[in-house]
Amino acid sequence: SWTKFFVAHAWSGIHSLRLFFSRPTQIKPKVISVGNFQMGGSGKTPFVLELLREAESLKKKVWVLTRGYRSNSESRGGVIVSDSVNVSANVFGDEAIVIHRAYPEVPIGVGVNRLASYEKLRWELGYEPD
């Protein structure tokens, strides 16, 4: 319908303007971003697990930053580290739980603001990833 067409293009335009006027933030470690336009079911989490397997084989210290879609941590942020207790999907989101169960030693920052999640992990752990 025309309404969906208009809303989709308006959203795209607003997002493009936001990206154009925002200044990129530099962080020290290398970043691999995994995403696409589809919310679920496109294989992003299995791909992240494959990247973590590769990082483990190369003995790299890595972190995962995720949005935590529809979780309590999505807006306020949260971290999962190896000794985290009470790690639940309500608090951190399903993706973070799947990753944590597969790689409990990998720190995970959860929240819509990935930079804030990165800073929380850096403060809590006292080091940066490779």
Image: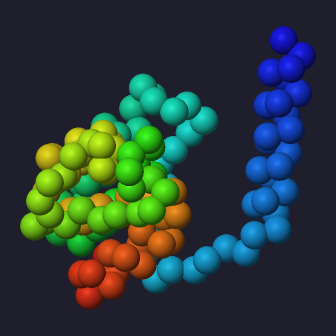
- Measured from the top left, where is residue 114 in percent x and y? 49, 64
Instruction: Name the residue furthest bottom.
Output: 126
Numbered-mark total: 0
Q: Is residue 122 visible?
A: yes
Which residue sits at x=27%, y=81%?
124
For the N terminus, the image quarter is top right
Q: Nearer the viewer, residue 120 or 73?
A: 73
Is residue 118 depicted above or below 114 in this figure?
Answer: below
Q: Nearer the viewer, residue 62 or 71?
A: 71
For the C terminus, the image quarter is bottom left
Which residue sits at x=24%, y=81%?
125
- Measured from the top left, where is residue 112 in percent x and y? 51, 57
Which residue sits at x=42%, y=26%?
41
- Measured from the top left, where is residue 32 in percent x and y? 45, 59
Which residue sits at x=55%, y=31%?
38
Specify how the rendered protein is coloured. rainbow
Is residue 109 depicted above or below 71 in this figure?
Answer: below
In the rendered structure, the answer to whether residue 94 lies left or right of residue 17 reads left
- Measured from the top left, where is residue 129 in percent x and y? 31, 76
In the rendered structure, the answer to whether residue 115 lies left or right of residue 79 reads right
Is residue 76 depicted above or below 93 in this figure?
Answer: below
Is residue 129 depicted above or below 34 in this figure?
Answer: below
Q: Is residue 49 visible?
A: no
